[in-house]
Image: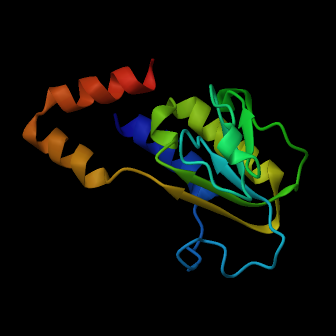
């Protein structure tokens, strides 16, 4: 278990950076126009952003919204240094570890110099509490979501 922790810690160290305080929309500090990529958007499609997820299609009510149907496990369909901001809310936890690392690396490839990567993840306290309480059902559910 310790060697797995060291392996993950060494890989994630490359992605650690000082958080950048931003406004409620996450765009207040950036000049317009800004290319914002919404990874794993699902039904949360933002007008003016590039919304991407597998199995999504734009509806007629979203005429001004870019929606790309793409499996993010296959990387990002953009040239390098094309995106100003990569945003993801509750998506990375649905990937297995290697796919998650590969996608983060690809996010760095498509981000412009000085670009921002912002991700929201589930509260780690839930997983830690489940571990301490011996709640195997919590991990069985998480395992089935990641490996589906």
* Quadrant the N terminus occupies: top left
Q: Position of residue 88 (x, y in %)?
A: 57, 51
Residue that sits furthest to the right in the current view: 79
Q: Position of residue 71 (x, y in %)?
A: 67, 27
Q: Quadrant of residue 18?
A: bottom right
Rendered residue at 68%/31% (across/down): 57
Q: Position of residue 111 (x, y in %)?
A: 79, 57
Relative to the observer, which residue lies in front, 44 or 35?
44
Q: Is residue 131 above or below residue 29?
A: above
Identify the colour scheme used: rainbow
Rendered residue at 25%/23% (across/down): 140
Q: Position of residue 19 (x, y in %)?
A: 55, 73
Residue that sits furthest to the left in the current view: 133
Q: Is residue 42 left or right of residue 46?
A: left
* Quadrant the C terminus occupies: top left
Rendered residue at 51%/42% (across/down): 91
Q: Is residue 82 above or below residue 143?
A: below
Relative to the observer, which residue lies in front, 97 or 112?
112
Q: Is residue 124 above or below residue 71?
A: below
Q: Is residue 77 left or right of residue 98?
A: right
């Amino acid at each position: 278990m310790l060697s797995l922790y060291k392996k993950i810690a060494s890989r994630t160290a490359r992605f650690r950076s000082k958080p950048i305080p931003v406004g409620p929309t996450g765009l207040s500090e950036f000049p317009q126009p800004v290319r914002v990529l919404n990874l794993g958007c699902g039904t949360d499609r933002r007008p003016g952003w590039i919304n991407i997820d597998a199995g999504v299609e734009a509806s007629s009510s979203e005429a001004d919204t870019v929606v790309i149907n793409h499996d993010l496990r296959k990387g990002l369909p953009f040239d390098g240094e094309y995106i100003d901001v990569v945003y993801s809310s509750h998506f990375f936890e649905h990937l297995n570890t290697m796919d998650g690392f590969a996608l983060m690396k690809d996010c760095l490839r498509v981000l412009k110099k000085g670009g921002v990567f912002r991700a929201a993840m589930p509260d780690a306290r839930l997983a830690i509490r489940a571990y301490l309480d011996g709640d195997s059902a919590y991990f069985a559910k998480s395992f089935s979501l990641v490996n589906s």
